[in-house]
Amino acid sequence: MKDIEIAQKILLEKNKTLVIVKNKEVIFSSEEKGIKPMYNAVKQLESKLAGASLADRVIGKAAAMLAVYANIKEMHTVLISKGGKVVLDESKIIYTYEKCVPYIKNRNKNDLCPIEKISQSISNTADLINEIEIFLGELED
């Protein structure tokens, strides 16, 4: 079984939101929602993510930028935004998805996801990471 197949299987069977597999071994998984799991994976594992495969429930532009930054090899998502798709189309990441939407909605489904909003005006990943840190810090206050 390929890494991406392992990641997809665990995502569905174990009800995870993000699963990252490298060399047939799960190196990261989470049940948390939002950008936090992807952000944590990038911050904790850094260069270990290069060449890994990931399965995620939702990929917006920010998550796609983080995947490119981490040199992810292959990914699958249930839901992707058009912004996320544009980022991945410009990368070397092999990806598949089940449904593409104009944008990722917030949890109340009445506006854009806050991170999707932030990422719309950002093209530099270092700036994006900084903005995510600020956002997550505000959530914890």
Image (cartoon, helix red, strand yellow):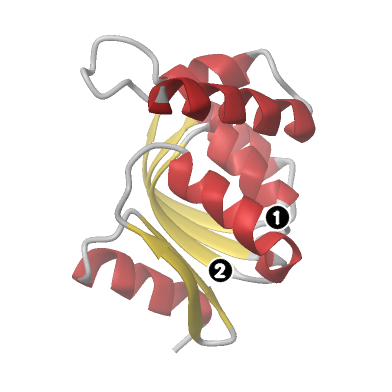
When the figure is inspected, residue 112 is found, relative to residue 7, above or below; the finding is above
Residue 103 at least partly seen: no
- Name the spot of residue 34 as percent of width and height, x first: 38, 37
Asked if the residues shown at circle 1 and circle 2 are in contact, with their CB atoms under 8 angstroms apart, the answer is no
Crowding at label 2, few (<14), some or many (≥20) Cα neighbours within 10 Å? Answer: many
Residue that carries the numbered disc 1 in the rendered image? 70
- Image quarter for residue 7? bottom left
Q: Quadrant of the C terminus?
A: top left
Q: Nearer the viewer, residue 8 or 117?
A: 117
Q: Circle 1: is it few (<14), some (14-19), or many (20+) Cα within 10 Å?
A: many
Compared to residue 67, the image places residue 71 above or below, namely below
Type of residue at label 2?
Ser
Q: Is residue 110 visible?
A: yes
Label located before the other in sequence (1 or 2): 2
Q: Which residue is mark 2?
A: 53
Residue at image x 42%, y 50%?
Answer: 97
